[in-house]
Structure formats: C-alpha cells, structure tokens
Image (cartoon, coloured by chain):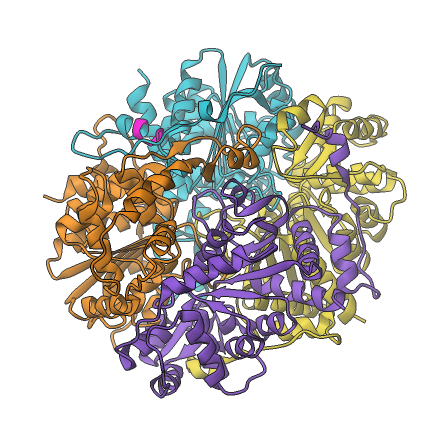
Chain colours: A yellow, B cyan, C orange, D purple
Amino acid sequence: MTPKPEIKDILKEVKQFKINKDTNISSLIADLSNTGFSAKRLAIACEIYEAMINDEDCTKFFGLAGALIPAGFQGIIHDFIEAGFIDVLVTTGASLTHDIAETLGYHHLQGSVDLSEINDVKLHNEEINRIYDVFLPNNVYEGIEDFVSNLKIVDDTMPVSEFLKFLGEELPTNSNSILKICAEKNVPIFCPAFTDSGLALQLGFHHQTLNLNHFKDMLEMVNLAWDSKKAGVCIIGGGVPKNFILQSLQFCPNSANYAIQVTMDRPEPGGLSGATLQEAKSWGKVAEKAQYSTVISDATIVLPIILWYLKKSIK
Amino acid sequence: MTPKPEIKDILKEVKQFKINKDTNISSLIADLSNTGFSAKRLAIACEIYEAMINDEDCTKFFGLAGALIPAGFQGIIHDFIEAGFIDVLVTTGASLTHDIAETLGYHHLQGSVDLSEINDVKLHNEEINRIYDVFLPNNVYEGIEDFVSNLKIVDDTMPVSEFLKFLGEELPTNSNSILKICAEKNVPIFCPAFTDSGLALQLGFHHQTLNLNHFKDMLEMVNLAWDSKKAGVCIIGGGVPKNFILQSLQFCPNSANYAIQVTMDRPEPGGLSGATLQEAKSWGKVAEKAQYSTVISDATIVLPIILWYLKKSIK
Amino acid sequence: MTPKPEIKDILKEVKQFKINKDTNISSLIADLSNTGFSAKRLAIACEIYEAMINDEDCTKFFGLAGALIPAGFQGIIHDFIEAGFIDVLVTTGASLTHDIAETLGYHHLQGSVDLSEINDVKLHNEEINRIYDVFLPNNVYEGIEDFVSNLKIVDDTMPVSEFLKFLGEELPTNSNSILKICAEKNVPIFCPAFTDSGLALQLGFHHQTLNLNHFKDMLEMVNLAWDSKKAGVCIIGGGVPKNFILQSLQFCPNSANYAIQVTMDRPEPGGLSGATLQEAKSWGKVAEKAQYSTVISDATIVLPIILWYLKKSIK
Amino acid sequence: MTPKPEIKDILKEVKQFKINKDTNISSLIADLSNTGFSAKRLAIACEIYEAMINDEDCTKFFGLAGALIPAGFQGIIHDFIEAGFIDVLVTTGASLTHDIAETLGYHHLQGSVDLSEINDVKLHNEEINRIYDVFLPNNVYEGIEDFVSNLKIVDDTMPVSEFLKFLGEELPTNSNSILKICAEKNVPIFCPAFTDSGLALQLGFHHQTLNLNHFKDMLEMVNLAWDSKKAGVCIIGGGVPKNFILQSLQFCPNSANYAIQVTMDRPEPGGLSGATLQEAKSWGKVAEKAQYSTVISDATIVLPIILWYLKKSIK
C-alpha cells in the first residue's frame, strides 16, 4: 500500500486571472482550471471530455435528460454527434418528441415566466403548452401525428433503438436533427422510458400491435459496455439516461475511466440524478482511477461552453 | 367574466402558534396552514390528500421516484396502499428492485456520508454499494437472482403491470412489501422505465425471450385516466413516474382535480421533475380549478407526516 | 493511533417502520433515526439538541436568519427561548424588525405566489410588500416608526446587544415576542448587520447621533465563547448569524461539541451558508469529536418538529 | 389602462444555433438570447449590464457575497471596478479579509473535496482552513495581523466605508486588489456586517477603542440612492449586500431601472437571498418597468462570462 500523499503536496496555488481582448475559450478554460468551485469543475469537465475524445480506446456514452431541444440547444447536441463526440446516446422520450417537432419544421416559442403576463389557464384555452419559459402550441402534435400515423413499421417487435434509427431515416433532412444525424452516423440511441412520451402515445394509438422490445435494448447496451476497452460518460441532467448508462457500465471490463455530469440535482435527497460520481465507484460503474467532474449548473449554460472548447481544441 | 378579487380579500392573517403537550399531528397541520413558505404548503398538501380520499369519485394516482425503500420508507408506502390511499402506483425499476430485496429478507444498511470514514473505493473492494448514506451489499443481488431465475413466466409479452402483479403473488408474505400489497389489493403498478433496473437486467439474463409489452401499459394507463370521473395525483420526487401520470391525465375528462408534489427539484432548469403544478394546467393535465400544492422538501421528512395526518384524520 | 473501524462495524441495519394511532413525536423521531437521507439527519438533529440541553456545561448558541417571523414562527422561536433552549441568540436586522411589528400588534398576511392572482406592481400601488407568499402592508412601518421615534436612548455608543435589551424592555408585553422574552430571561441578542434593516433605518433617521458600538458586541461574543466550557450551536438558514457564531467559537477552548444546521443552501457554490459542519472542523470552529447534523430543509417544516420533540423529551 | 398584449404577441421563436470557429463571446450571447432557461437569462443579464453602463444617468450598485476571491475571481471583480462598471460596492467582511490576504501576497490554495484525500480533522492539525475546495493556511492571518496592528487609525468613529478607503490607501500596489482599486478610483465600499469577519476581529483586538460608525454608512448609502437619477443593481450571491442595496433603493426616486442577480438561492424558503427581483417591485426597490434578470448559477461560471461580454461590447 502506497502512503497517502501529504496535504501540502495535493494543494496548489489558486491563480487570479484576467480577461482581456486576447481571451479565447481555450485560455478562459485554462484560467478557470486554476480556480475553485463550479468554474474549476467546468474547466476540468472540458479537459476530461477532450481527453476522452483523444483516447481512441474510449467509447463515449452521452446521457441527455431535460428539455434542451425546446430551449434551443438541438443544434448543439446535433453537433456533438456530427463531430464524433458521442458514440452512444441515451435520452428521454420527450427529447425525441421535441426533436421530431423541430425536424418537421415546427418551432418552440420563447416567452416569460411572469404569470401576470402569461397565465397557464389562458394558455390552456389558447392551446399552448408551457415548459418553464418555453412554449409549444398544440398544433405541433398534429404535425407529429401525421408523420407517425404514416410510418410503415415492418417489425412490431424490433428494439426501440432500431426503431429510432428507422425514424431518423424517415425524417426529412435537417441540419439540427438529432435522430437524423444519429441515423446517418450510425450512433445508436437508447430510450428506456420510451412509452413515457407524446411520441409513443401517438405510436400506440396508430400502431396498436406495436411491442418494441425494450429488453433487447437493455442487453444490447450491456454488450456495448462489455465490448468497450475504456468508457467515458457525459451525463446531462440525470434521470433514466444516467442510470441506464451507469447500470450498463458495471459490465464494462474497466468501468468508466472518464466521467462528467452537468446537473442542478444534489446528493442529499438520495436520488440517482444528484448522486456523486464518486458514489458510482462503490458500484463499479466508475473506475477507481477515473477522471471525473460534476458541474452543478444548468446545462444550457455549460453545454455550449464545453462544445466551444472542444471545437477549438480537437483537431 | 367575473371581476378579479381585490388583493385585500385574498390575503388573510398569518397566525403565530404554539406547540405544547396537547399538540397532535392534526392540530400541528391546522396551525401550519395559517403560516407561510414550505410549512404552509405541507399543511395544504395534507388537506388536499385528505380531500381526495374523501372524494369517492376520485382515482388517486401516486408517482414514486427516489430511493425511499432503501432509506427505510417501504413500510410507509406499503401503508398508503393498504389503507386505500393509492389507486394506481407508478414507480421506477429501482424501487421495485429495492422492494424485492427487502421483501426477500435482505436489509439495506445505514452509515455515514463522511468519506474519510467510508471510502467508495474501499466499499467497492468490499462489495458494498452506496446510495448516499445508505448501503447495499452485493449479495442482495444474488438473492434477487435466485428469485428471478426460478420464476415461471407463462407469457413473454404480457404488459409490465401484469408481470408486476405476478411478481407480487410470487413473493413471500411480508408486512412492508409494496409489490405484495399491490397484488393483494389489486392496485396496478406501472413502471415505464422497467428495463432501467437491476431487476430487469436479471430478468433479461435469465429469460432471454422476454418482451414485456410496454405499449399496452401505456394504453391501459390512458384508459384508467379516461375512466376516472375525477383524478388526484401525488408525486414523490418527479422523474418518469411524474410525467407518465401527467401525460395520461391529459386524457382524463376533467384533468386532475387534486395535485400534490413533494420534491427537491425546482422549475428554473426546465426539467419536468421540478416543473410547477400550475404549468401542468397549460397542458390540460391539472384542472383549472384544481387544489394543488408543491412541497419543496425531501420526501423522507414529508411523507411520514402526511401519512400520520391521514391516519388520524380518515375514519 | 487507533485503527480505523471496519466498514461492517460502522454500518447498521435500516429499519422499516410503521405509523399508527400510538405514534407520537418521540416514537417518530426514534423511528426516523434508523432510516436515511434527510429524515435521519432530522432525527439526529433532535437528539443532538436534546443532548446539548441536558449537558449543563454547554452554552447554546442559536443563529436565526430568514423570514421566519412573518411566516408565523415567532411563537416557536419565543418558546425555544422561554424554555431555556437558547443561551445566546444571533439574528438579522430583518428578524428584529418583524418581531417588533408583531409585538406591537401588527400582523403579516398570508397569500399566494400565483402572480396571476397577486401582481407585484399592483401590490406596490396598494402599498403592500411581499416576502414570497407572505405580505406586509406599509402601515406596519408607520407603527414601528412611532415606537422608534419615541425611544429615549441614554447612550448613543452602547453595543447593539445592549440596545436590543433596552428595546425588549420598552416593548409591550406579548406572548410571542423574541425581543421581550430575551430581555426578560437575560438572553443576549447579537445582530452584526443591524444597519441592514428597516428598524435601523428608522433609528438612523430619528436618532442622528446614534453610533451603536458593533466592535464591543464582537468582543463580547468572543468572550462568551471563550468562557464556555462546552458550546452547542443551532444554525437556522445560515447567513451572517452562522458566520458570527462560528468565528467566535474559534475562541472557545473546546470549539463546538454539538452542532446543528437547518438550511436549503448547499456546499457546492462555496458560500458559508451552505458550508458543511465538517468543514468547520478544519477552522477549529467545530470540535473533532463533535456530534453534528445538517438538515437540508426549509426551517418552517423542521423547527416546529424539533421543538415538539424537545418539549416532549426534556423534563 | 392599456389592454394586455395577446399571448401570441409576447411569444417569439426559439432559434436553434451553432457554435463554430467564428463564434465569439458577443455572438454566443446574442445566440443565447434566443433560447430559454438559464442561458437566456444569462444573455439578458449581459445585455442589461451593457445597457446600464451605456446609460449615463445610471448609478451602478454591485453587491458581492460569497468566497469569490479565494476561488480566484479577485482579478475579475477588480477589473469590473477598474473598467468603471461599478459605482458603489457592497460586500462582506470575509471578502475584504480575503482581498487583503491576496493583496499582501498570500495565496489561497486549490484542492479536492474528496474527504478521503483531505480530511478536515487533519487539516485542522496542519493549520489549514477549508472553504469547499479552496484552502487557506493559518499563517495568512498572521500576515494580516501584522498589517492591521500597524495601522495608524486617526479617527475611531469614522464610517466603515471611510475606513475601507483608508485601508485601500495603506495596502501595497497590486493589480488585483479590490480595496486598492476602489481607493484609487474613489468607488465607495460598504460593509454592513463588517464585525462579522476575521479582519474586524483583528482590528478589535489591536484597536480596542475603535467604534466605526455603521449608521453613517447606512445614511450615506441612502443618500447615494436618493441622488441617483437612475439606479442599476448587480447582485452576486445575495446575503447582506443584496438587502443593503435594495433597502437603500427604496429611497431612489425611480427605484432600480436595471437589475441583475446571480445566485444559487431560490425563492421557496422565503429568504431574501433567493427572492425574485419581481418581488422587489412590491417594495418599490425595483421599478415597475425595470429590465431584470435572475441567473440561477454559480457566480464563478457566470461572472467571467459577463465581464468578457462587457469588455468586448463596451467601447
């Protein structure tokens, strides 16, 4: 057993820094890595993501929960995939529903959370749905329904991931679509809670014999982990995508060597979304020597910064 | 259009109160209803739950996310069901896994979050998994595996809810088991993200032809909502159970007339777990005139208080 | 150096529990002490407070921040003092202002956070101020002004704590007043940010030569800590009261032996309000072997429970 | 009374956006202003700060709470002042203590929050204090003590703000020092809870007759607000600085026309730190027609971004 390092050998100087006209995203992140609190964690997250991209043995798992697409970050996630920064995507049924809406040419709307301006009852009467300060008119669902009802589904019992690839192929060309770029680049999408979505509701209504095989997805995900020499994971928001990736990584020979999470959830209430990445070591989901960083932040602020850093750093 | 009430007619006096030897849970909640902040919301939540139990036309939907069973609240949830306070349960695969573990006689362990005492790497070496300050030795999973591998599953394509009833029947008698009491009392359990769990992993490994029909669950849940004259909903923690209940209630003729949520999540990051119940009105999930209360709190504090209040109040 | 205990010796069984007609606050807290997450921390906080009351050598410091009095918890805090559960109170100027308002017979009002019902601009026009879901008409300040302007202040440079005792003596008899009961029971009140309050503004306007000596308060607080054989601390909400108590306890020969905090703030942003009690050990504010518990909760839920438990337990 | 605008006239399209090699901080903020959630609020905060700098009638109040200087953001705040982006600074005694430490040439240290690496008891034994993941050796306080004990204080009853100007003049030249740049640029610093700090403790020990006049500060702050044609406010972290600015702005003829806050605190527990800026309208602290934005985020991420944006935008 190697002796524990002395505290004075672990600590290093915090460096005050400046921002000026020569500041760029690389220099900012380098400066933030010498600071503390969330800024330091963000800097480390950027560096870990860069390292996992540069590690050719690493399979990059990406868990996406939360309404990022309605909020305007569909193109950001699309570009993570297009740039090859995601090998396996796990997401929610809601994200897929939102992705289809935008891909079909519908748009979410931006507004206020001031209820004295925009009242939820009035919204209901005008058939507009609210997601915090983003809004979605009901007619979007009619457009999705047209698309869904016309699908020719050749196999009612294919895995969800296979069905999602089919969806991506059926969707029109769109420079932001997540389903489309995943289909084109052969990036598998898993969605363990698929039936918890407006998309699945419409599928269920129009294709009554559908029984997509969720168990095959689960086993395929385990196989992907099993076959990964190394694994890296980036968790946005927590939820089912976080747990589904981490439960699979228990079967990865080396667990996750790189781990990032961006979330507003915290550990104290005991839910998995807020659980520390350190805790995941006890489960064998994250490796003992892994590089890891949790950034307590809204992903809408942090995700563009990470992408900006990666676009600049990765040649 | 009726005129808006004057502000002075909406506001009423905050009443300072005392606690003494005659205080009981009913008097405490009555006192808290005259206060502000979270205490008032808790009091209102108690009163709403009481009202929805006393409303014979109301179907009571209960969404459960988070590791409440490992933390020691299996008996509390069991008793909500036994007392008839829950008509439809929606939960996570993890909760079901935890419920089976405890029902088979295994126990979760209580410890510290002080990592200088209990290190996650050391835990991993000793095959003990951590959920914040609660711990689970790996051998529990071996016990679950024995149970799961011996199941005789007669229909590979039944809905998850039907399978969960079967599980409840197969489990030994236990005074705290959620699966057992649901089977006995015919309370349906839905689990849209079932394959996101240790239980499903073991099922998948041992029963390779299993393809439980998640779409039938989804449609059955819509039917339950559709057939409800009135609906009441109690959301613990958010997550998939929250969304699955609320998406179904869009099909309830009157939406939810009663709505409670207990969560540490907040609206600002835009995720559904933290979304306000008011926002759900815009979607037609919660009725315009609904009674509703969100308590920002750890459910481990609030849930026993609500049950205590209900046990005292409901004759 | 004693060997570290084995993990298996630290962990003990989580015990599922029931609530029934014989449940009382003592049995509930005893049951919660065998659970996890926030409920366990609340149970431990109750037991620590009980222990520090029963320890005759312990000086009990109580830090109070947040608008608890407007929300209806003035009587609760009053009773902590009346029962002898607080030896030294540190609070905010706002709390003192609120206490005077209620003591003079004014009342805060209870309302909704639904801005479509109660709009802040309209409130301003009607001269009603909002504190989340609690409201305060401007005329309250006129009443406070009458009281303040008529004060005969004999010494412009007395410490704030001495001035607060004088205020308590001048106030009318009131069964909930914190200033009154502190004056009667000779419990010192410290308020380091006194001039950050409506009360101080009115004092400054009407008593232009006032220069209360804040440094004497600071040194007196250090003396109180210095003279304490043992110290116990209960922090509600954080803020200046938390730091002022903890900075003084660095001068207590044994630091704090008992420490409780109830707050919604978290450690990650690096502010003192959310800092862990463990961190306070590094500063010598909390003793190495101290009993301590942080409850992440709104104090309006937790404080009545703690008082209820103490009233039942302390003979 | 003008009719309320229709919902459809308030809502506008969320625009998906891209990040590429031509992205700069101005274009990123412009893109984020078309999104939702925290990113949109950050973009609006940047634009409001820009507007208040460009408004020559606007006095810019800046409230600073939290350990930003230990974390490495002393230079950032220094540069806000140097660039003329702050007219009046209100802060905590801790921030002033930290500023003096760094200005005298001491450095805070960066480390881990992993308690299995860095134990708080061991830290105490090695005389190193912890602020989350930042560390401060005790010998820093000895350096501050040397500085403080040698001060020649000519007037024991000057206001705190005057004393802080004197401190700034006495400190050595330093390109990051907040006290120094404020003294040089004649930017007043207010610190209502001054005696709640290590700096004040050392002053009190070495200058026993000191009785800095806090009431004069309070009245001077009211005068500054009173004399402001327009006011703008940027709140970092909340606490006493937030309340002290806002209570003064009640006396500004037009209240605040611009208001920004960056905090991790939330409204639900009822404390002022987390209170909405909208609520401040009911008090007459923020103007009815004010531009305002609350960003729920760690300031260490957001403050550099705002400064970067301003440096690029302001000519």
Which of the image's four quarters has the C terminus of chain D? bottom right
Magenta residues span: B30-34
Residue C293: x, y in percent?
A: 31, 55
Image quadrant assignment for residue D195: bottom left
Q: Could you tell whether D60 is left or right of D12 in the image?
A: left
Front residue of A209 and B36: B36
The quadrant of the rendering that contains the N terminus of chain D is: top right
Going 63% across and 39% down the picture, which residue do you hit?
A: A113
Give the answer, above or below, for where B242 lies relative to C204: above
Residue C207 percent coordinates (x, y): 32, 56
Query: Does residue C112 sit above or below D140 in this rendering?
Result: above
Q: Is residue B90 visible?
A: yes
Q: Residue C222 in the image: state x and y as whole percent.
A: 23, 70
Q: Is residue A178 left or right of residue B230?
A: right
Residue A23 part of the magenta segment: no
Which of C112/B312 is in front? Answer: C112
Point 14% across, 67% down: residue: C229
Secondary structure mostly seen in magenta is helix
- Give the percent coordinates (x, y) of residue D142: 36, 85
Whether residue C33 appears in this view of the structure is no
Q: Is residue B52 left or right of residue A220?
A: left
